[in-house]
């Protein structure tokens, strides 16, 4: 364990950094889980449906941002 304050420690020493591909894969898994939860909701669960739909949009946006895209000139 490092004796340096947390603010001075390097992220590299924690060895828990994700690659973009790993993060993208985890996001895709979370998207699939959220899709299943959303499909299981009944009509009376409108508030939860809205929250899950919002979460799904955010997850898809984050996953899209991790995909390498060609740079536009």
Image: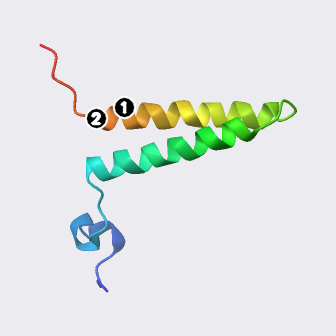
User: Secondary structure beneath disc 1?
Assistant: helix
**2 w.r.t. 39: above or below:** below
- In the displayed structure image, the side of residue 36 where residue 27 appears, left or right: left
- Image quarter where the N terminus lies is bottom left
Among the 4 quarters of the image, the one containing residue 44: top right
Query: Which structural element holds mark 2?
Result: loop
How packed is label 2: few (under 14 Cα within 10 Å), some, or many (20 or more)? few
* Total residue callouts: 2
**Residue placed under numbered mark 2 in the picture:** 67
Q: Position of residue 57 (x, y in %)?
A: 53, 30
Q: Pointers 1 and 2 in contact (CB under 8 A)?
A: yes
Q: Residue 18: x, y in percent?
A: 30, 57
Whether 40 is drawn above or below 17: the answer is: above
Q: Residue at x 51, y 47 (%)?
A: 30
11, 64: nearer the viewer:
64
Q: Residue at x 28, y 79 (%)?
A: 4
**Image quadrant where residue 62 sits:** top left
In the picture of the structure, the residue carrying the numbered disc 1 is 64
Q: Is residue 68 left or right of residue 53?
A: left
The image position of residue 12, as x and y in percent, is 22, 67
What mark, if any, has residue 35 been given in the picture? none
| Residue drawn at the location 73% of the way across and 40% of the way down | 40
Q: Nearer the viewer, residue 10 or 53?
A: 53
Residue under the image location 49 percent in, 38 percent down: 59
């Amino acid at each position: 364990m490092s004796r340096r304050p947390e603010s001075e420690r390097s992220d590299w020493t924690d060895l828990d950094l994700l690659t973009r591909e790993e993060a993208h894969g985890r996001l895709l898994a979370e998207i699939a889980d959220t899709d299943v939860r959303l499909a299981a909701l009944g009509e009376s669960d409108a508030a939860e449906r809205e929250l899950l739909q919002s979460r799904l949009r955010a997850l898809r946006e984050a996953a899209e941002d991790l995909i390498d895209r060609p740079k536009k000139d």
